[in-house]
Amino acid sequence: MEFLGLVNYALFMGIFICIYALLALGLNIQWGFAGLFNAGIAGFFAVGAYTSAIVSTPPADGRLGGFDLHFVFGWIAAMLAAALVAWPIGKICLRFRSDYLAIASIGIAEIIRLVIKSEPVLTNGARGISSIPRPAGDLAYMESQIAYLIIVLAVLIAAYVLVERQFNAPWGRMMRAIRDNEDAAKAMGKDVEFRRLEAFIFGAALMGLGGALFAHFNRSITPEAIDPMVATFLIWIMLILGGSGNNRGAILGAAVVWIIWSVSEIATDRLPHEYAVQAKYIRLFLIGLMLQLVLRFRPEGLLPEPLRGDQRATKSGADPR
Amino acid sequence: MKTKFIALAAGMLAATALASAPAQADVKIGLIGGVSGPIAAMAPAMIDAAQLAVQQVNEQGGIGDGENLVGVVGDSACNPQGGTDAATKAVNIEGVVGIVGPHCSGAVLAAAGSVTIPAGIALITPSGTSPEISGLEDKGTVFRTVPSDDYQGRALARTMKEMGYGKVAVAYLNNDYGTGLANAFKAEYADELGGEITQFAAHEEGKASYRSNLAELAKGGADTLVIFDYGDGTGLTILRQALENGFFDKFVGGDGMKSDAVINELGAENLANFVSSSPVGEQSESLDMFNEAFKGVGGDPDAIFANTSYDAAFVLALAIEKAGGNKADVAAAVVDVSNGEGEAIRPGEWKKAKELIAAGTAIDYKGAAGDHNFDEKGDVPGTYALFEVGSNGFEVITEMK
């Protein structure tokens, strides 16, 4: 192994962490702010990924599009499409209490996956869409990764600043009030249902953007990417571990979990050769164990939600990075 | 807890750094597969088969000046996320000179698009059958030892045209198998060869009666019905009802229709005009050699994609030897060692191949799963044959080209 290899690997991890951090931020708006248990992240991720793919690929036979537009339009379209899909879903499902919402959202993610898989006219079906342009993709391997990392990092920072602003704004306080005591919020004259829908749609839009960034990085998107393990539950683990209700926590959680998820494979590869196949399962075990430990010893996550009323806690709170 | 987590993460990083510190003269190839995830049951045999090739190489002199070939196993979890992650690690941390895998098409597309094509590393998948892989702009670095899904549909169309079939109607099951085959068939039969497809219709699974579908299909005046479905399921019902009502004279099926259930249920005497295509495990010397060797290490040679995995690893090893261990030349060498020209090399004949390469003689690998003469897209033709129903079950009429 050479130094350059390590750098390349670090760049790759950086890109994935940024993409997952966007998904975790989206989930943080829904769960951390508004207390909506969305277990269908994969669905919005997929809508975003496919929308951007259709908008930005060159025209192809047998499926919708492509429209061959600049990737920026693809990303904007991804956010809009995810928001648009979230609207009727939220309208219907947000009436459910938390655990029923979780069940409904799992079902919806599955419906989205099956539609994508079995509608070749729309999404090319099981074959997926390939040759999606990657921004700065013509550069050499490492330069192209650096350029993409800069782009996703910029997107992540922009998203973080905006979400953090909202969190500290009256809107954020209102959302937490609704989350913690719905009746009291209602008594204060807040339109609870509308506000929840708002949070659901904003979160979904960010998830859609995350999906789009993912599709452009891989230059392809297939129904196999809409795997609940890596597109829903891994993100939940990131948010819970990082600290739900805290935007920095969401980002930190994404970084910690992805690093452990990815680097642990290199560690388990040091086991004797005969166990090479079995060793892969140790990673799954590790992630599960980590979640258990966090829930047992630190249920509020690595970076807990800042105390109500003490806004400075978010700005000068301990930052372990 | 915070510090503990950081310590844990740091510890893992340190372990990684330490573990990779010793400078080895090994030549590494990545064996990336869906170890966890939906194909977890199939993956171990595929990886074992690839490791068998690695083992044979090492037993018979290794790579170059007796360097060890090492297969580094990576988990693609059968999804793009895992595929890119495993490929990035294989290429950058392990420094592999080539990759066998990933196993699932989505992971292949993602790993190729974001890692191996930019890095210029050769990738040979033993089981990614998606037609999308053919269309990758891969600078000649992506190969596969399994035919594309497109291939059977197109080969069937060509064979039928040759055999003089005229107007046909196509009925296909509405899932990825049925649609994939039917579209490939249509593209070749109607668009390329100018044959006439009078009706082209999907049907849903598990209905009691397909008479209305069949009546619709028969409208264009076709005398042949092509069925892309499963012979132990809906396809059987359709075939039976078509026979009972005399909608069509001749019937053609895809590989799903080549099921003993069809003969048992309908009787061989009624199936005189029924033919079906199917992949044939070409009874070659190569396949026997692989089966023998794989049994020898405790593997099951009938395991699905085991022979294609073995071939992928062996071809890659030959290419590395040919390229003299130079990463950038491996992809081009893959075509050189298996293009149908040169001294034949069969599975396990590493020593012979090594001597021939050293002497500068052209070699041609004849694999367990086929000859693997890669075309410019990195694809291989499959070995399919057309079967008819004889007195002893299905019998080969002709090979499909």
Image (tube, coloured by chain):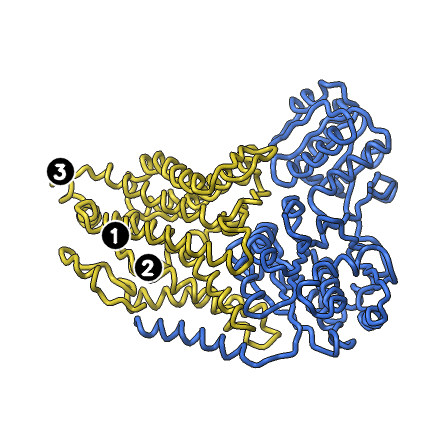
Chain colours: A yellow, B blue
Q: Which residue is mark 2?
A: A240
Whole-percent x, y for residue B167 in the image: 78, 24
Percent coordinates x, y for residue A309 in the rendering: 13, 55
Q: Which residue is mark 1?
A: A164
- Residue A236's x, y, as percent? 37, 55
Q: CA distance from mark 1 to mark 3?
A: 25 Å
- Residue at (32, 66) in percent of width and height: A294
Amino acid type at image mark 3: Gly
Mark 2 or mark 1, which is nearer to you?
1
Badge 2 sits on which subunit? A
Whether labels 1 and 3 share one chain: yes
Query: In what element is the residue under mark 2?
Result: helix
Can you identify the residue that label 3 sits on? A189
**Are the two marked residues, 1 and 3, in contact with CB atoms closer than 8 angstroms?**
no
Secondary structure of the residue carrying tag 3 is: loop
Q: Image point 20% across, 59% down: which residue?
A: A306
Task: Determine crowd level at label 2: few under 14, some 14-19, many 20+ residues with C-alpha closer than 10 A.
Answer: many
